[in-house]
Image (spheres, grey):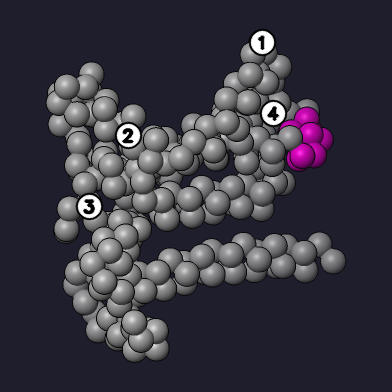
């Protein structure tokens, strides 16, 4: 394999407006963005409750979320496949090998990551922001917004980490999506398929999309932190 020639072909694919390639990118982004959007608010509220409330079983629940982060995505995909198959308890939903199944799988993957990282953000936040807001008569939602603003950068880092995790995972998407062209084929499953066939140009092009995305997200976070630092000085 000529690495230089493959890279040139990949760049050409990116800028040629190849419909197949950008269709795959579109599936990846639409599925992953919807998945993280659906779990963002529930994860935020649970993380806040774990950090600022005391109730029986709190640390057991937190340990469960921390443990779920390390479960391989292919295992989650296998369990979800068994649930959604015709013989499974959710077979009547007819979701297997659809984008809905992929969204459900990615929601399960990113939810514990969001809860654990957001819990850490709230745990290390200044409680005085929460207490002051309540003392001044702010409603609970408004006080929560004030607290979120105080720890906005760790919360943003949690969202970026969770999104990066699901948009690059291959196991769950392959199991429940089926890697169907123009339907459920996303960036990671397409890279795996094309590389196994020896068609490396498209795989490299899709890999470049993920790399550009990672750089862009990290640049955004660094820029926001730097801007906030300048304001405080």
Of callouts 2 and 3, which one flags the residue occurring earlier in the amino acid sequence? 2
Q: Nearer the viewer, mark 3 or mark 1?
A: 3
Residue 56 is tagged as: 1
Of callouts 4 and 2, which one flags the residue occurring earlier in the amino acid sequence? 4
In this rendering, the answer to whether 165 lies above or below 182 is above
**Proximity of marks 1 and 4: CB atoms separated by less than 8 Å:** no
Q: Secondary structure at mark 2?
A: helix
Q: Position of residue 228 (x, y in %)?
A: 72, 62
Q: Identify the residue at the far top of this view.
A: 56
Quadrant position of residue 14:
bottom left
Q: Position of residue 78 (x, y in %)?
A: 32, 34
Q: Identify the residue at the far right of this view.
A: 233
The residue labelled by disc 4 is 51
Residue 179 is tagged as: 3
Q: Position of residue 80 (x, y in %)?
A: 31, 31
Q: Nearer the viewer, mark 4 or mark 2?
A: 2
| Disc 2 residue crowd, few under 14, some 14–19, many 20+, Cα 10 Å | some
The residue labelled by disc 2 is 78
Distance Cα–Cα, label 2 vs label 3: 15 Å
Q: Secondary structure at mark 4?
A: helix
Can see residue 72?
Answer: yes
**Proximity of marks 2 and 3: CB atoms separated by less than 8 Å:** no
Give the dominant element type of the magenta stretch: helix, strand or loop. Answer: helix
Q: Nearer the viewer, mark 1 or mark 4?
A: 1
- For the record, the magenta segment spans 124-132
Of callouts 2 and 1, which one flags the residue occurring earlier in the amino acid sequence? 1
- The residue located at (21%, 22%) in the rendering is 88
Asked if residue 170 lies left or right of residue 127, the reply is: left
| Disc 1 residue crowd, few under 14, some 14–19, many 20+, Cα 10 Å | few
Q: Nearer the viewer, mark 3 or mark 4?
A: 3
């Amino acid at each position: 394999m000529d690495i230089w020639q493959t890279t040139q072909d990949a760049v050409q694919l990116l800028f040629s407006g190849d419909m197949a390639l950008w269709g795959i990118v579109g599936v990846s982004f639409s599925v992953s963005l919807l998945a993280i959007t659906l779990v963002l608010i529930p994860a935020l509220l649970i993380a806040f409750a774990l950090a600022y409330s005391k109730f029986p079983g709190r640390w057991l629940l937190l340990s469960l979320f921390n443990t779920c982060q390390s479960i391989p995505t292919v295992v989650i995909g296998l369990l979800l496949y068994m649930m959604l198959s015709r013989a499974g308890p959710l077979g009547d939903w007819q979701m297997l090998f659809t984008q809905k199944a992929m969204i459900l799988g990615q929601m399960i993957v990113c939810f514990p990551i969001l809860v654990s990282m957001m819990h850490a953000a709230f745990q290390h936040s200044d409680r005085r922001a929460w207490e002051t807001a309540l003392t001044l008569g702010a409603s609970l939602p408004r006080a929560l917004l004030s607290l979120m603003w105080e720890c906005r950068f760790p919360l943003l880092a949690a969202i970026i980490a969770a999104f990066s995790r699901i948009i690059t995972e291959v196991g769950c998407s392959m199991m429940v999506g089926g890697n169907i062209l123009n339907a459920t084929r996303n960036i990671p499953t397409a890279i795996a398929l094309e590389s196994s066939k020896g068609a490396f140009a498209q795989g490299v092009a899709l890999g470049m999309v993920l790399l550009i995305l990672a750089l862009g997200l990290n640049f955004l976070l660094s820029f926001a932190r730097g801007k906030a630092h300048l304001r405080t000085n």
